Image (tube, rainbow, N blue to C red):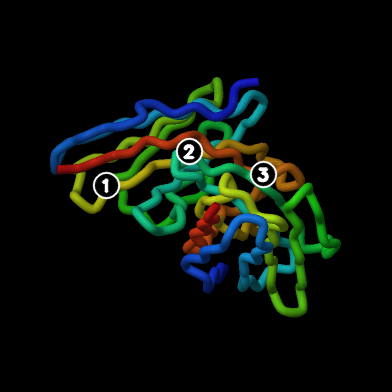
Amino acid sequence: AQKVTQAQTEISVVEKEDVTLDCVYETRDTTYYLFWYKQPPSGELVFLIRRNSFDEQNEISGRYSWNFQKSTSSFNFTITASQVVDSAVYFCALSEEAPQGGSEKLVFGKGTKLTVNP
Amino acid sequence: DAGVTQSPTHLIKTRGQQVTLRCSPKSGHDTVSWYQQALGQGPQFIFQYYEEEERQRGNFPDRFSGHQFPNYSSELNVNALLLGDSALYLCASSFFDPKYNEQFFGPGTRLTVL
């Protein structure tokens, strides 16, 4: 069965600090997809990144970077030089390929609430 | 390029009533999924529609039903509302092809059951 664990419930940092959000996943499939979403107070889930299980290259997008390690089943997310606007709940999610075609549902972790203080 | 839209934004109902939530997918997307997000929790998958058929279903009772229309828009219906159905209901759209399976979410409908 699929499972996503985000052990950090809440993190509080001061602006300009770097912060890493942890995500550990469980799946029996060899083909799967990992995602990160941001949910600001407005409530809308904003897509940040998607990785497939065959691509372990780390990715950097501006101040955001992601570290995917299959050996430890982790897909961690780092924000460099955090800003107040980064304050939100961040969700890690997992999806597998459906036997009947298409993609399986997204299975979400419980989220990490990040507060960046000025 | 319009993103995913949902209506209404907020809804207040009483126990036992029925509710219909609506979703229009992002332009070009053919698959719609619905999720329920209780306060302080991650979204939970309800069901997914593609080609006007329910393709997958999560652990939700039959009181939760849906529909997809030829223009790919979708409805979520909940009958015999319970207090526990109070939540944010999120619609997500995507391409069916798993190579392009990023799900984009709408702003949600906040349902309160009194």
Camera-side residue: A39 or A94? A39
Residue B62 visible in the current orientation = yes
| Residue type at the position of mark 1 | Ser
SS for dot 3: loop
Report the residue marked by disc 2: B91
Q: Residue A117: x percent and y percent?
A: 52, 55
Chain ID at mark 2: B
Instruction: Read off the residue under disc 1.
Output: B86
| Label 2 and label 1 in one chain | yes
Instruction: Answer with mark 2 or mark 1, whichever residue precedes in sequence.
Output: 1
* 3D distance between C-alphas at marks 3 and 1: 27 Å
Kind of residue at disc 3: Glu
- According to the picture, the residue beneath numbered tag 3 turns out to be B102
Residue B47's mark?
none
Q: Say if B49 sits above or below B9 in the image.
A: below
Spatial CA span between label 2 and label 1: 16 Å
